[in-house]
Image (cartoon, rainbow, N blue to C red):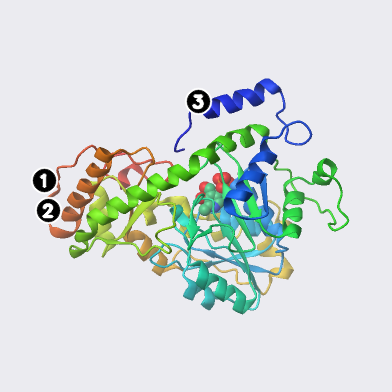
Amino acid sequence: MYIVGQEEIDALAAVIRSGALFRYGVGGECERFERRYADYLGTRHVALTASGTFALTAAVTALGIGPGDEVLVPAHTYMATAMAVLAAGAIPVIVDIDESITIDPDALEDAVGPRTKAVIPVHMWGAACAMDRIMAVAAKHDLLVLEDVCQAIGGAYEGRMLGTIGQAGAFSFNYYKNMTAGEGGAICTADDRIAERVRCAIDPCHFYWQGRSDQQKPFAGNGARASELIGAMLNVQLDRLPAMIEAMRAEKKQILDSTGSLGNLGLKPAPINSPEHDCAAQVMYSLPSAEAADRFVEVFPSVIAGKTGRHNYTEWDQILIGEGAAHPVMNPYNMPENRDCRRAYSKDMCQRSLDILNRTVMVSTHPLHDQQQIADTIHNIGVAARVALAGMAPAEADLRNVQPVDVQKFDLKVTDIASA
Ligand SMILES: Cc1ncc(COP(=O)(O)O)c(C=O)c1O
């Protein structure tokens, strides 16, 4: 959660006072948000739902992905990306990331097989995937592209809003995201047919509320409607978003400009794709070794990407043990249609990704950081770099005004960082 204040309280109170908490027929907040967010993104459709996980599931379903299909997902993402593939009866295939800590376009192309139907590039920690190269691979191999934008709301790639480059994009509005309603999710697409199918996946009765269409045969779906409380809160959060992203980009630029000379010691900015357009929620550095990264965070509370538990494939228990559904017959790993899909996983299958992640350190920005806090962060990065890379004794580290790290957001063990 970045900024929540009186405006959100007023918007929620107004909905509660009106008694119109249901989106269809009585309330107008969800619909208003969907229109405004589609305009903001520069696309035709946005459909709200109850979570980012369900947004991904609805999008995978709407794209027609199912048993017999493989979907390529990166080794570093929240496990929901892969779970959404299983929910549709398809098989996730895990692909290496590169130093940008997003899916590696070369590894992606190498991973395409006869069963591969789609790829889900995940814009991690606010940083964009290499979308031009990914779209080129997708076009060459006739793959669908669903962007997972859950962690990168407000970000863009070379001027195009994230989520609008592939056939569809999925967003999360949970507590930790750039816009939040506590929980919530959305799908965007420019394709009318995909939009219609997404709405059917979100609410099997959607045609009842919105009118039947001759173009679309309904299918059975789970209910995951958003409430008017989610819509109302997001309408306020959307007003805040542009200034928030601008502030984080300015902070990131200031930190990178001021720490550029530390490259001589070995503290190099991670090679982010489209660096002018990302959300700038994190300043990322690639260190020469995992040991140096450990020393860095032991001095200055910050985050090693490889230690963010649930975001690494090594922690996706259900996948590693092949439990793709609650019932064995519904388990995609047992389905005869998936016999020829690649279904073998191991904890060391993406060693290159683990190596990169264990060398990547992230320092969080925040839209409310003032100049003094930013100057202190720059100072602290310098001190940590000298300890990690230039032999300075930790006892000599004179840190200033250290901001705490959000242990839950990054799924850290308290022992992994200097102080929580
Ligand atoms: C990359 C990514 N994908 C999907 C999700 C799932 O979103 P939610 O928690 O709203 O279900 C998240 C949320 O943490 C995420 O970070």
Coordinates of residue 331 in the picture (x, y in percent): 69, 58
Instruction: State how many labels appear.
Output: 3
63 relative position to 311: left or right: right
Q: Are marks 3 and 2 in contact (CB under 8 Å)?
A: no
Q: Residue at x 48, y 53 (%)?
A: 155
Q: Amino acid at mark 2?
A: Met
Q: Rounded to the nearest whole Å, what is the CA distance between mark 1 and mark 2?
A: 7 Å
Q: Amino acid at mark 1?
A: Glu
Q: Rounded to the nearest whole Å, what is the CA distance between mark 3 and mark 2?
A: 46 Å
Q: Is residue 346 above or below residue 53?
A: below
Sequence order check, earlier mark of 3 and 2: 3
Neighbor class of circle 1 (other Cα within 10 Å; few <14, some 14-19, many 20+) is: few
Q: Are marks 1 and 2 in contact (CB under 8 Å)?
A: yes
What secondary structure is found at the residue carrying circle 3?
helix
Residue hosting label 3 = 6
What secondary structure is found at the residue carrying circle 1?
helix
What secondary structure is found at the residue carrying circle 2?
loop
Residue hosting label 2 = 392
Q: Residue at x 46, y 38 (%)?
A: 1
Q: Between residues 222 and 336, which one lies in front from this camera angle?
A: 222
Neighbor class of circle 2 (other Cα within 10 Å; few <14, some 14-19, many 20+) is: some
326 relative position to 241: left or right: right
Tag nearer the camera, 3 or 2: 3
Q: Is residue 60 above or below residue 32?
A: below
Q: Between residues 133 and 99, which one lies in front from this camera angle?
A: 133
Q: Amino acid at mark 3?
A: Gln
Q: Are marks 3 and 1 in contact (CB under 8 Å)?
A: no
Looking at this rendering, what residue extends furthest in the right direction?
A: 214
Sequence order check, earlier mark of 3 and 1: 3
Tag nearer the camera, 3 or 1: 3
- Res 358 seen here: yes
- Residue 86 picture quarter: bottom right
